[in-house]
Amino acid sequence: MELVTKYHGVIEYRNEDVIVFKKGLPGFKELKNYIIFPLESNDAFSILHSVEDIEVGLVLVSPFTISGDYEFKIPDTYIKELEIANSEDVLVLTTVTLNSNVENITTNLKAPIIINIKEKLGEQLILDNDKYKIKESLFKGKNN
Amino acid sequence: MLVIGRKKGESLLIGEDIEITIIKIENGSVKISISAPKEVRILRKELYKEITDENQRAMVFDSATLEKLKK
């Protein structure tokens, strides 16, 4: 199948690749079906793209690449809703807010996106504690 | 939309499983106790709005910046 996206060209995908977000995402509650693909220009990043809206594609990154000790508990209700049977089936990604000034690029560690890659189910989990920020610097302290 | 007045100590029942009680009213702030099943997510609205806004910002795609990052 083909998805003609507004900003990322034409993406080929199979129906089996579609990840269902039964609750949508905060800000996109009506959009339930997404595909995920690596960014051509930089594969450290991925795009979670709606197959129902050609404009909606969120830039994501693996939070563990920038924060080795990023840790949180997935609540039981999420384990149940996402039908998680095995921790190996879990993919955690966080949204990235880009900026032309690299030092101002941030990722949202406070609301990780949890995906069960086996069952193709996803949900965004909001961590209601002070441990992590919505705008966590991606390149903090790295001088290039 | 239901607008209802409650005094300290009074409660509201929502649906079959949710109960909200006003615990304390002081200095323009209300302390509320919420009893609900685990599956019901309870969030401060402003936090939810911040996440919504940040998700919107994550849609902004700047390939020039991302190319720069590869180095």
Image (cartoon, rainbow, N blue to C red):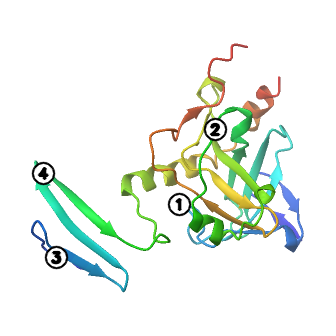
Q: Is residue B45 left or right of residue A76?
A: left
Q: Residues within 10 Å of mark 3 (few under 14, many from 20)?
A: few
Q: Do badges 1 and 3 share one subunit?
A: no
Which residue is located at x 31 percent, y 67 percent? B34
Mark nearest the camera among 3 and 2 is 2
Farthest residue, direction top: A143
On residue B28, the disc is: 4
Using the image, name the chain to which the residue with label 3 belongs.
B
- The type of residue carrying mark 4 is Gly
Mark nearest the camera among 4 and 1 is 4
Q: CA distance from mark 1 to mark 3?
A: 28 Å
Using the image, name the chain to which the residue with label 2 belongs.
A
Q: Residues within 10 Å of mark 1 (few under 14, many from 20)?
A: some
Give the percent coordinates (x, y) of residue A113: 65, 54
Between A118 and A135, which is closer to the camera in this rendering?
Answer: A118
- The type of residue carrying mark 3 is Ile
Q: Secondary structure at mark 4?
A: loop
Give the percent coordinates (x, y) of residue B32: 24, 61
On residue A9, the disc is: none
Q: Secondary structure at mark 2?
A: loop
Q: Is residue B1 left or right of residue A106?
A: left
Marks 1 and 2, the one that precedes in the sequence:
1
Task: Report which residue position mark 3 lands on.
Answer: B4
Give the percent coordinates (x, y) of residue B9: 13, 68
On residue A70, the disc is: 2
Between B6 and A18, which is closer to the camera in this rendering?
Answer: B6
Which residue is located at x 72 percent, y 60 percent? A115
- The type of residue carrying mark 1 is Gly
